[in-house]
Amino acid sequence: MQTTDNNDMVTTQTTTRRALRTRILTARDALAPAERHRLSGLVHSNLWKLPSFAIAATVLLYVDFRSEVETMALLRLCLLTGKTVAVPRVADNHRLIPYQLTAPDLELIPGAYGILEPDPVRCLAVAPAAIELVVLPGSVFDEQGGRLGYGGGYYDRFLANEAPQAVRLGIAFELQVVPSLPLLAHDQRLHGLVTERRTLAFPA
């Protein structure tokens, strides 16, 4: 009976998570490009005010796709200020492999799902243990440090198994934040969340 109850609970959580993703991503996709660009700039400004981000010498940044918080301007600014910038590439075994980026216009090529990824021929791999801070995308975030990705678990596995030492900062639009999420055991919690309106810090 207990096993059946647990299975029913997981099924309910999975359904709730899927519905949340759909609702929030639909709202995010509805943002006009100009508004998304404006809000992304405010997110960047708030991110730079965080001491943990300002002092991090080696950071892992995602390359924005579709309606995510834009990151190309952030990436270029990090390079200009002397940070070592890594971006992820999806490997055949469903792992994220970080590669150092120095010239985005030359080194990014279409990869998995059409997302721009580092060219492994031009770029050097970065040891996950060297990454001090990871800036994470996501579909939905909550006010306790919870995060839902897009269902693949790539960042959750990377953080849990390869870069547990890294500070984890989510960036999102305020419309992606809900009071609480139905998290599962594998979901990795954040140390901070930055939106265009506020910055939230969570216990380690």
Image (cartoon, rainbow, N blue to C red):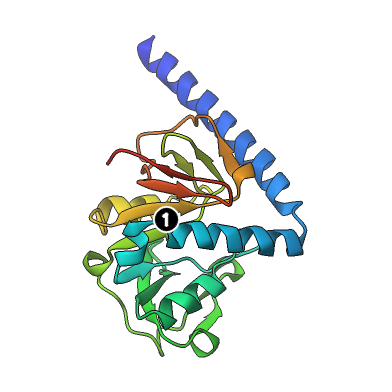
Residue 57 % position (x, y): 29, 71
Question: Considering only vertical position in the picture, is 72 above or below 39?
Answer: below
Of residues 13 and 133, which is closer to you in this image? 133
Q: Residue furthest top?
A: 1
Tell me what residue is drawn at x 36 percent, y 61 percent. Answer: 53
Q: Quadrant of the N terminus?
A: top left
Tell me what residue is drawn at x 60 percent, y 64 percent. Answer: 41
Query: What residue would you read off at disc 1?
Result: 154
Of residues 148 and 46, which is closer to you in this image? 46
Q: Quadrant of residue 131?
A: bottom left
Question: Considering only vertical position in the picture, is 82 above or below 54?
Answer: below
Residue 200 % position (x, y): 44, 42
The answer, for residue 67, to whether it is visible in the render is no
Q: Quadrant of the C terminus?
A: top left
Question: Considering only vertical position in the picture, is 11 above or below 45?
Answer: above
In the image, what residue type sits under mark 1? Tyr
Under circle 1, the secondary element is: helix
Q: How many marks?
A: 1
Q: Residue furthest front?
A: 49
Residue 188 % position (x, y): 36, 44
Q: Quadrant of residue 178?
A: top right
Q: Residues within 10 Å of mark 1 (few under 14, many from 20)?
A: some
Tell me what residue is drawn at x 35 percent, y 81 percent. Answer: 82
Residue 172 is left or right of residue 102, and the answer is right
The answer, for residue 9, to whether it is visible in the render is yes
Residue 36 is left or right of residue 124, and the answer is right
Tell me what residue is drawn at x 49 percent, y 79 percent. Answer: 76
